[in-house]
Image (cartoon, helix red, strand yellow):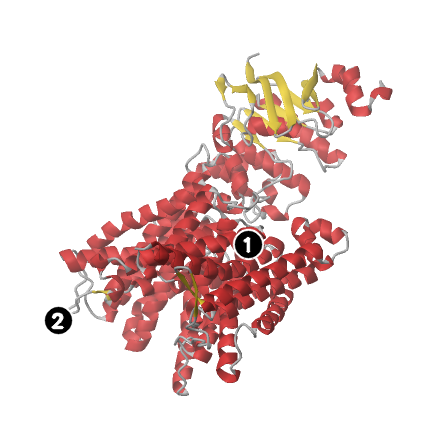
Amino acid sequence: MMARLSAGLSRRSTVALAVLLAAFLIAPLVVNDYLLTILILILYFAYAGQAWNIMMGFAGQLSLGHAIYVGLGGYVAATLFTRFGIGPWLGLLAAIPVTAACGAVIGYLAFRFGVAGVYFAILTIAFAEFARIGFDHLDYVNASSGLFLPVKQYAHNDLWLLRGDPTMFYYVILAATVFAFLLCHLLIRSRVGYFWLAIREDEQAARAAGIDTFRYKMYAVMISAAVTSFAGVFYAFFYNNLFPEQVFGISRSIEIILGPIIGGIGTLFGPILGAFVLTGLAEGLNSIMNAFGVDLPGATQVFYGICLLVVVVALPDGVWPPLARRLGLSGDRK
Amino acid sequence: MPLAVYLNVAVGGVLTGLVYGLMALGLSVIFGVVRVVNFAHGEMMTIAMYIAVVMFAWFHLDPLIMLVPIAAVLFVFGYALQASLINPFITRPEHSQFLLLVALAIIIANTLLIIFGPDARAVQTSYAFDSFQIGQMIIDASKVYAGAAAIAFTVALFAFFRFTLLGKAIRACADNHTGALVVGLDVKRLYALTFGLGAACVGAAGAMLVLVVDATPMVGPSYTLLAFVIVITGGLGSMPGALAGGVLIGVTEAMAGLLFTPSAKSMFAFAILVLVLLFRPQGILGKRAA
Amino acid sequence: MTALLSLDAVSKRFRGLLAVDRVSFTVPEGAIFAVIGPNGAGKTTLFNMIAGALTPNGGSITFAGKPVDGLPPDEICRRGIARTFQIVRPFPALSVEDNVTIGALLLRHDVGAARQRAQALLQRLDLFDKRHRLASTLTLPDRKQLEVARALATEPQLLLLDEVMAGLRPTETDRMVAILRALNRETGLTILLIEHVMRAVMALATRVLVLDHGVAIAEGAPEAIVRDPAVVHSYLGVEAV
């Protein structure tokens, strides 16, 4: 299996990957709690960004409402836990079909009726907003007052219930990110992956080559949605609270896409690099501001906006492709 | 509930809807000519609202008096934006343009947040609590003035596009880009002008809206979405469509607020958007996109 | 020879304009069938109806004994009819090899096997050395060959070519003609081509159909067609006859 995975990656890339993985594995032993939380955040965005990338980078469908899958995943798992005591991993098993179905509905409505490009993006925003307002009024999950998970002091880490200290969460999200990375790696080299690329490049030509574009676009949306749902489950059990405004908001959707766009849409490393750059720099900015005693709410967002602007204007393919060329690591398929 | 209540709310909705319509008109003009999806539309309106708030707070200048200057400021802003940042993006893929404007929207909204803080700011004019009484209907004076201003501004805009040479040149650009180039029109300058006009519309709408709604830095996205709903519902590329759509959404919102909970009123706008996108994507008055 | 494709009184109307008016013809298996005619004759409309991009208003299209009019383009391809585009549409950001592999993946679900088939086709079409280059970097004649390769990778029984010679220099035209002739001879592939370049039509076609104003005005062997008075009339006007 390792041979098959490293086929297509140059020797250099494989070594670099191994080093990177090793660094991530030992990180909790060497960094302090604050940095650990930052790393968790980075990996969270890398994971969510990778999931979004399946739809956009591979199949070319721009979703600006991806927060809906995070929110649904979180609420399904959290509700099952708070009301029925069902653990998050089983909750995930429930969240996956729910988010996939949601994706299927959005996809079906869009693709059957020819809603594409920017209109598709607007449709996804509309659905996310619909969910936000809907959940804000849904008393079953406490509406706008928020859903809270019980937090008790545990003597040890409970992986089954995801109750424990940050180190446990770190390894969980790291495993998830590695999983997402491997999944995308396998997908892009599979028949489905090739068909997605064809659809992304030229949908009409793809149809002329016999590809049932409707079906494969649906696959992309549903798989992307299902993979994203775990981010919601993780979010719920890590932060222990869910507010519709927070979880379904358009800012969340935009945060998810920033990593892959800055890193490089459609690449494997893009979302990870983007998440690093973005969160790393943002925290750097925060630290500097704190050091000077300056407190500007909204400053990080302005910073995100400027990053996005710079990337869109000057580096349309993202930061990763030119960087990869520099480092001689271009075995990575786009 | 007595009929009068429904009528009151409906009329209020129509008047607010006219302002919405003007805002949407700006978006329609921009999209119809420059073919750029202006995701920062709501944020431009927020800028206008805050200018109105500041002018009122410092100089006691009524937003309606400031209407033209605010529109002018936004015109310059829009013109500069198109000329410097967006024109080079015309040839780029759609999602690049979109993301450029998303980035601008984020920067604008959060800069306003830094400058003004998150609290709502209102403009309390002397006539803020006045109302007109017609038969059994009681209508807010602010809404009447706002609605009237919206109509006046829109008529002026229609006249510009219909009767002036510049207006016709812009319409020519929208109809046939290459043809316009061939005939020697400076398309880039016309694009910048159009963006400026669209921005002016939304600026005027902002100045009017601040009479009726409080200004907060983060209202941008919901108004951008509202503008999209209106434009798509009314019909892309149709100016009367934008107004008609605005009134429709205004009334729907108002009635939904009356019959259900006020905070859920946006859901109806979105439901309408989904329905229109699915079943009549060219909108009520629009033509099928080429 | 059995009829592979047959059109029976096929018509297409665009609001007021009758673009194709009750056109009927049969393409036998193994033939190279050309459709020619002056601009605006309805050739592209006819082509698009066979390829599934348009639905006829009247008549029927039968392929391998089954009706195919009104089917979507991807289903048409799966039935065994592959097409190229008049303005070439390779997948620009993908490599030449990936482009053809995608075509081969239709019937070969294993990526490795599809890639092998793609490489074989690229050899045949003189593109093997360029297989790692991005499709967008190729010259026009190479891109046209790439489209043909991708279409062939779907293992069609009928290949539809839409003005594939357009924009090619005479030597490049001859090369394409040679490749198509060889394919037809060695694999029995049936070809239907819309063409303006008479050099190619004369060299390739076993049978020619002439359209004018949506109506079929002549059908027969190439040599007979070019001498047909109605055909000369439609191209050059009454005076030329």
Q: Residue furthest top?
A: C1
Looking at the image, do the residues carrying marks 2 and 1 touch, with CB atoms under 8 Å apart?
no
Image: A181 above or below A169: above
Q: Residue furthest front?
A: B135
Q: Position of residue A126 (x, y in %)?
A: 41, 54
| Residue A178 visible | no
Does residue A324 appear to the left or right of C220 in the view shown?
left
Towards the viewer: B168 or B9:
B9
Chain identity of mark 1: B
Towards the viewer: A41 or B142:
B142
Say which amino acid is labelled 2: Ala
Q: Which residue is mark 1?
A: B94
Q: Residue furthest bottom?
A: A292
Q: Position of residue B119 (x, y in %)?
A: 39, 76
Quarter-of-image position of residue C217: top right
Chain identity of mark 2: A
Say which amino acid is labelled 1: Glu
Quarter-of-image position of residue B138: bottom left
Mark 1 nearby-residue class (10 Å; few <14, some 14–19, many ≥20): some
Q: Residue at x 68, y 39 (%)?
A: C141
Marks 2 and 1, how far apart at CA: 53 Å
| Residue A309 visible | yes
Q: Position of residue A204 (x, y in %)?
A: 54, 39
Q: Which residue is mark 2?
A: A155
Does residue B171 appear to the left or right of C159 in the view shown?
right
Towards the viewer: A150 or B269:
B269
Image: A20 above or below C136: below
Does residue A24 appear to the left or right of B141 in the view shown?
left
Q: Residue furthest right?
A: C239
Badge 2 marks a residue whose secondary structure is loop
Q: Residue at x 75, y 26 (%)?
A: C198
